[in-house]
Amino acid sequence: MNVTGQTVRSLLFAFAWGGRETEGEQAKERLANGRSTLGSAFGITPFVRGLCGALAVLAVTVLAPLPALAAKYAAIVVDARTGEVLHEENADTLTYPASLTKMMTLYLTFDALDSGRLRLDQALPVSAWAEAQSPTKLGLRAGKTLRVEQAILGLVTKSANDASVVLAEALGGSEAKFAEMMTRKARELGMRNTVFRNSNGLPNMEQLTTARDFSILSRAMLSDHSRYYPYFSRRAFVYGGRSLNNHNRLMSRYEGMDGIKTGYTVASGFNLAASAVRDGRRLVAVVLGGKSAASRDARMEAILDRAFDKPSRGSEAPVVARAGDEDTPRATAKGRPPARPETIAQLASTVSTPAAVRPPARARDEDADSPKADGSKWGVQVGAFSTREASKRALTQATKQAPFLLRAAKPAVTPVKSNGSTVYRARMVGLDEGTARKVCSELTRSGHRCVPVSLNEKL
């Protein structure tokens, strides 16, 4: 491994800032006790430990003169269906994401599963760099392998830093290149103030985000990867004979909560991105910079309670239009795929968001014009809605956001039937692939959901 200035900076920063994913004050005490035991075993005196710490901080100051951000409280609550902001405080303040970072690692992993680049049962190699990651981790050993589904569950429950690097290296070739992929995806989703430098959230002063940006990622996870979202509801994961409990304690006591991810470093404070559904209404919320796990959780409960008491302005419910059996994930090692709602109505109540997702298998564009023979066999999908009128309004809004790129496109509202229910898929068709991707880039920058679709596929 080449040792660069960035590598040294990151390692020293991690040493100086105590970058460890933990939950609660007891975990911090265990960490302190472990350091004390290690020092005693090697005859390291308090003076030497203090000197090493001072030198590390000095080195960080020299190598990375960027100002350190103090952990500052920030929060946001958003209606997952409409995007309406129901509460916000310091939502655009820059801070460190800690292990919320793993949400983007998982998002890209789910992308790879959908595209066939990964399989749930695929064995991935463990590198020396993955083994060397700081706790919390699964304790992987270089030269061994880890199945993709095990890595996913390791991230969701244990927040395993080593498993995160295994996924990053499999998809990006190296963790640094994968971090570049993460940042590009963040921009595509509309996360304007987020920069990733690693896959797991271990301390790096250049890895920054905001509460608003992670609310965007939370909604994108629900809409784009609803079939994998049940992984975030797993309470525990057994690996190496150990049962690893999910760090999100609120799932066991807050009504309707079913994910998403916790995070902690000394610099970031206690972070939590969460989603909960009540009476068919789903909210996503992000709390950053909590003083403790308990105070962070209490704050999350309070802002969600107040937000659920507020009526939503939106009345039309866009729903995820994945209804085909082919979209069911392959079975897990125990033969059970993540739970999938059986009807569109159930799906709307659990993961209803302004979704623009891949169309269901074997559905037909009944209302769409046939694609032209000149290569204009692409389109963009901006949502799947419960009424035809809502789909038309979404297409009108999309056209206003990208009038030049969509000047030659034609609107197409397609009914999709599944289990006795109907949703209406909203697309603009008659584009080439390059234009379709530019349209989605433009729309996501404006906060809209969009996905390019090929009309050549046999649907």
Image (tube, rainbow, N blue to C red):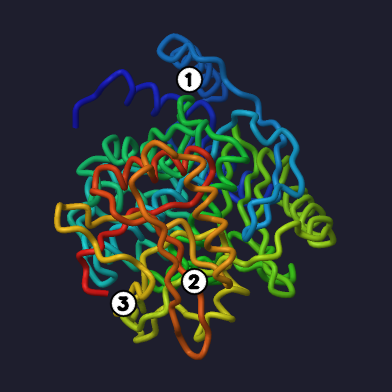
Q: Distance between the residues labelled 3 and 2?
A: 15 Å
- Secondary structure of the residue carrying tag 3 is loop
The circle drawn on residue 361 is 3
In the image, residue 459 lies at what x, y percent?
A: 27, 74
Q: How far apart are marks 1 and 3 (CA)?
A: 59 Å
Could you tell me the amino acid type at mark 3?
Ala
Binning the other alpha carbons within 10 Å of mark 3 as few (below 14), some (14 to 19) or many (20 upward) gives: some
Judge depth for marks 2 and 1 and give the one in front: 2
Q: Is residue 430 left or right of residue 423?
A: left
Q: How crowded is mark 1: few (under 14 residues within 10 Å), some or many (20 or more)?
A: some
Q: What's the residue type where badge 2 is placed?
A: Tyr
Residue furthest bottom as drawn? 420
* Quadrant into which the N terminus falls: top left
The amino acid at mark 1 is Cys
> In the picture provided, is 281 more to the left or to the right than 180?
right
Q: Is residue 152 above or below residue 423?
A: above
Q: Which disc, if any, is residue 52?
A: 1
Mark 2–mark 1 Cα distance, whole angstroms, equals 63 Å
Please determine whether, in this image, residue 233 is positioned above or below residue 268: below
What is the number of the mark on residue 424?
A: 2
Which residue shows up at 19% across the image and 27% down it?
2
Point 45% across, 32% down: residue: 195
Tell me if I can see residue 244 in this picture: no
**Mark seen at residue 182:** none
Q: Which of marks 1 and 3 is nearer the N terminus?
A: 1
Q: Residue at x 21, y 65 (%)?
A: 123
Q: Element type at marker 2?
A: strand
- The percent coordinates of residue 360 (x first, y second) are 36, 74
Q: Can residue 303 be seen in this view?
A: yes
Q: Tell me which label, 3 or 2, sits earlier in the chain.
A: 3
Q: Position of residue 323 (x, y in %)?
A: 42, 79
